Amino acid sequence: MKRVAILGSTGSIGRSTLSIVESYPDRFAVISLAAGSNLQLAYEQAVHWHPKLVSMAHERDAETLRKRLREAGHSGAEVLSGAAGAVRVATHPEVDFVVSAIVGVAGLEATYEAVKAGKQVGLANKEALVVAGELITAESKRQGKPLLPIDSEHNAVHQCMRGGKLHEVERVWLTASGGPFLHTPAREFDNITVEQALNHPTWKMGRRITIDSATLMNKGFEVIEACRLFGLPPRQVDVVVHPQSTIHSMVEFRDGSVLAQLSVTDMRLPILYALTFPERVESDLRFNIRDLKQLDFCPPDMNKFPCLRLAYEAAEAGGSKTIALNAADEIAVEAFLQARISFKGISRVIEATLGETVASHPESISKVLELDAEARDVARNLVEHIGGAVQLPAKLH
C-alpha cells in the first residue's frame, strides 16, 4: 500500500490523482491533501477520503473548513493553511509518495521539503524545476530518490529513457502542438485577442498555461525541466511541432534509434506510471493504434515565437535567469489576460526583465523566492511602461 500526499488536490492533476487512487484501492491510500481556495471541493475531498491532514491556501478558508467538518461529524482531520500547511502535508511521516501539482511557485517550498524528507516525489509542477531545479535535483541525488515526472512530455521521456543509458542519449525531442497560432502570419500577432489565445486546438487547460502554449513559453519551460530532470544541456533538448499531439516525446540514441511514446491524451496515465514506477500495472487507458492516420512534424519558428528562444537562453544561464523567466512570464501573461498589454508584449516584458537580471545561482529556497519577488517587481514596472518609454529599474542582485 502506497500512502499518498497531494499538493494541489482540487486542481485537475489532483482530481485525476484521486481518480487513480479510487480505481486502485488496494494499492493507494490518501494521507494528506493541500488544496487551493476551492473550499467546497476541499470539503468534499476531506469527507470522502478521510485524510489525516488538510491544508488550504488561506487561513480564512481553513477556519471555515474546520467548522464545516466538525458540524458534519468529521473532526478527525487536522486543518492547516498557507505555505507552512503545505509543507506539513508534503512531509507527513506516514506519506510515501508526494504528488506536486500546485501551480506556480506556491508549492515550491513544500516540494523541496518533501524531497529533503526523503519522500518519493511525482512532479506535475514545472515551475518548481524551472525556478529551483538546481537545488531540488541536487537534494534528490543526496537522498538517492529520483524525481518522477508527471508532466506528459517528461513522463514520456522517462519511459523512453528506459530503453538505454543516459550516456547513450543523443538528444531528447519534446513535441509541441504549435498552439492556436501555428499558421497565423507574424504580421497579425499584434491583433491577437485574449479569446483567440485561449482557444487551444487540442488541450483544455488553465488560463495561464493556455497562453503559455500559444506563445510556446510552456514548451520553453519544458526544455528547462528536461535539462534538469535528465541532466542534459540545452543543446541536447530539441522542440519539434507535432500538431496531432499523438507522440508525447521522443528520445534519440547515439546509434540512430529513436524511441517514441504514444498514449491516450489523459493525464491519469502518466500519474499512474509515476505512482507505480518501476511497475507497469493494468489499466483501461488504451490508445487505439488503428486510429493513427497521420503524423506531421516541423521545426518551431523562433522569430514568430520569441518566448521559446528566451527560454533556451535562460536554460543556458540557469539560476536567476530561469527564476526571472518564470516570474516575468506570469506577470506578463496576467497583464495580457487583463488586456493591459498585447500578445507580443508578453515576450517584450520577459526579454526586458531577463536583461535586467544579474546572473547568479541562489543557494537556498528563500533566496530563490527573494529573486522571484524582485523579478516580478521589474516585470510589473515594465508592464506599466510597455506602451511608452520604459524606465528600467536597477539590476537584480
Image (spheres, rainbow, N blue to C red):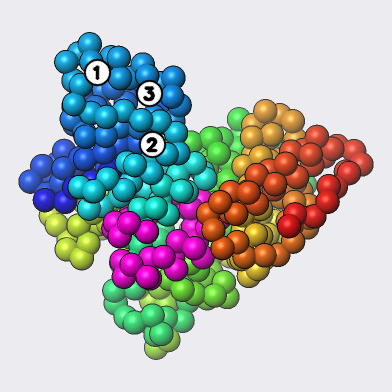
Q: Which residue is mark 2?
A: 85
Image quadrant of residue 256?
bottom left
Q: Amino acid at mark 1?
A: Leu
Q: Does dot 1 land on a helix, a strand or a loop? A: helix
| Vertical relation: 138 (above or below) 324 | below
Q: Earlier in the sequence, mark 2 or mark 1?
A: 1
Q: Is residue 125 left or right of residue 217?
A: left
Q: Which mark is residue 32?
A: none
Q: Is residue 52 above or below residue 218?
A: above
Magenta stretch encompasses residue 184: no
Q: Which mark is residue 69?
A: 1
Q: Label 2 near label 3: C-beta < 8 Å?
A: yes
Residue at 25%, 23% in the rendered image: 44
Q: Earlier in the sequence, mark 3 or mark 1?
A: 3
Query: Which one is nearer the viewer's eye here, 103 or 361?
Result: 361
Residue 339 at least partly seen: yes
- On the image, the x and y values in percent for residue 67 come to 30, 14
Magenta span? 116-145
For the residues marked 2 and 1, what is the alpha-carbon distance in whole angstroms?
17 Å
- Residue found farthest to the right: 389
